[in-house]
Amino acid sequence: MEKPSEKCVTETSGHLYIISAPSGAGKTTLVRMLLEGDPNIHLSVSCTTRAPRKGEAYGREYCFTSEADFLERAGRGEFLEWAKVHKHYYGTSKSWIDIENGAGHDVLLEIDWQGARQVRKIFPDAIGIFILPPSIETLRERLIGRGTDTESEIGLRIEAARDEMRHVGEFDYVIINADLPRAFREISTIIDASRLQYATQRQRHARLFSALL
């Protein structure tokens, strides 16, 4: 399916997509496939107070900053959503999203349901997509297949997943990731359809609409 090129984008606002899923549902793989196949989707880079790990670069994995700077920016309301996780702060920059959307780029956020709820208070038109596993058994098998967690840790992840999945009704679209190629086609279809909405087409092709109408 042909994707709109950046050349046809005028001064307009892009879409904001929120993708959430429990650990093991396949979110990371689907997001990577989307980014590789569509240059007009930009992944939001979160700010964090943790130190860079080996191979990480500023502005690619995260925007690294000090705790004092982070809390000062949080106090000024610069973050769409933020939280403290394992002694470190993480937050989504509102100004970065405004700049990207203003340039006509679509922005994708990988956040949990709590972050999604915060974001939609500011961006009520954000498009929420929730990815579900086909079963708890499949979810457990995927977590075991990673080889990174103990049996007790996997049990905790399963319980956390159950809690996250109870909030699936807060999202606009649901993809059941039983088959990766099919799940990718479905998430791509959601994005393509949102770009074909009348308001979006009229904004992104303002000159054409003016000439035709």
Image (cartoon, helix red, strand yellow):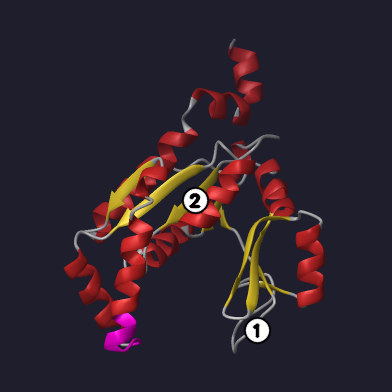
In this image, 161 relative to 213: left or right? left
**SS assignment at label 1:** loop
Question: Taking the image as drawn, is residue 40 in sight?
Answer: no
Residue named by callout 2: 18
State the residue in front, 163 or 29.
163
Return the residue at label 1: 52
Quarter of the figure that contains the N terminus: top left
Which residue is nearer to you in this view: 16 or 66? 66
Q: Residues within 10 Å of mark 1 (few under 14, many from 20)?
A: some
Q: Are marks 2 and 1 in contact (CB under 8 Å)?
A: no
Residue type at the position of mark 2? Ile
Which segment did they paint magenta? 148-154
* Residue drawn at (74%, 52%) of the image: 95
The amino acid at mark 1 is Pro
Q: Is residue 103 magenta?
A: no
Residue placed most toward the observer, 18 or 41:
18
Dot 2 or dot 1: first in sequence order is 2
Say which of 125 and 60 sits in front. 125
Farthest-out residue, top: 213
Residue 149 in the magenta stretch? The answer is yes
The image shows residue 163 at horizontal and vertical percentages of 36, 61
**Residue 22 percent coordinates (x, y):** 36, 64
Q: CA distance from mark 2 to mark 1?
A: 25 Å
Q: Is 193 on the left-hand or right-hand side of 135?
A: right
Q: Residue at x 65, y 37 (%)?
A: 13
Q: Residues within 10 Å of mark 2 (few under 14, many from 20)?
A: many
Residue 100 at x, y = what percent? 67, 49
Is disc 2 placed on a helix, strand or loop? strand
In the image, what residue occupies the spot 46% across and 30% down? 196
Decide: is 78 above or below 58: above
Res. 157 image quadrant = bottom left
